[in-house]
Image (cartoon, rainbow, N blue to C red):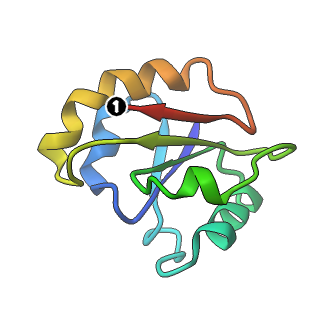
Amino acid sequence: MKLLLDECVPRKFRNLLPGHDGRTVPEEGLAGKKNGELVALAEKSGFEVFLTLDRGLGYQQNLQGRAIAIVLVRATSSRLMDLLPDGPDVLRVLRSIRPGDLVKIG
């Protein structure tokens, strides 16, 4: 699955997601884009899932009819050590997530 990791997600978090093609917002040249534009550009670039820690994103985006899904990890901080416990849950969600879904973890 092709994943886009938001700027707030540590780059090394993708190492916890074997079997998935994880790229970061800066690697894709999308740093600094606002959420709505970022999700639209990610979708247009063929990303299937946008992984974020931004709790406001779920309230800002209407995903109905979209080809991309969002996984929102609600961790205590954006430090990798605080995200490590959520890795298995993210992997579990990626097995069943569908376009247009918003799944909250943590």
Residue under the point 44% across and 59% down:
6
Identify the residue at horizontal 47%, vertical 43% (top origin): 72
Horizontal side of 55 relative to 76 (left or right) equals: right
The residue drawn where x is 39% and y is 52% is 53
Q: Quadrant of the N terminus?
A: top right
Q: Residue furthest bottom?
A: 32
Residue at position x 43%, y 72% from top? 26
Residue 79: x and y in percent read 17, 52
- Tell which of 2 and 70 is nearer to you: 70
List x then y, in percent, for residue 92.
Answer: 45, 18
Give the residue furthest to the left: 81
Q: Quadrant of residue 17?
A: top left
Residue extending farthest to the right is: 65
Q: Is label 1 in a helix, a strand or a loop?
A: loop
The local crowd at label 1, few if under 14, some if 14 to 19, many if 20 or more residues have their Cα within 10 Å, is few
Q: Is residue 88 above or below residue 10?
A: above
Residue 78 x/y as whole percent: 24, 54
Residue 36: name its quadrant: bottom right
Q: Is residue 12 left or right of residue 92?
A: left
Q: In this orientation, which residue lies closer to the viewer: 2 or 79?
A: 79
Examine the rendered structure and indicate whether residue 98 appears above or below residue 66. Answer: above
Q: Quadrant of the C terminus?
A: top left
Answer left or right for 60 relative to 84.
Answer: right
- Mark 1 sits on what residue? 106
Residue type, numbered disc 1 = Gly
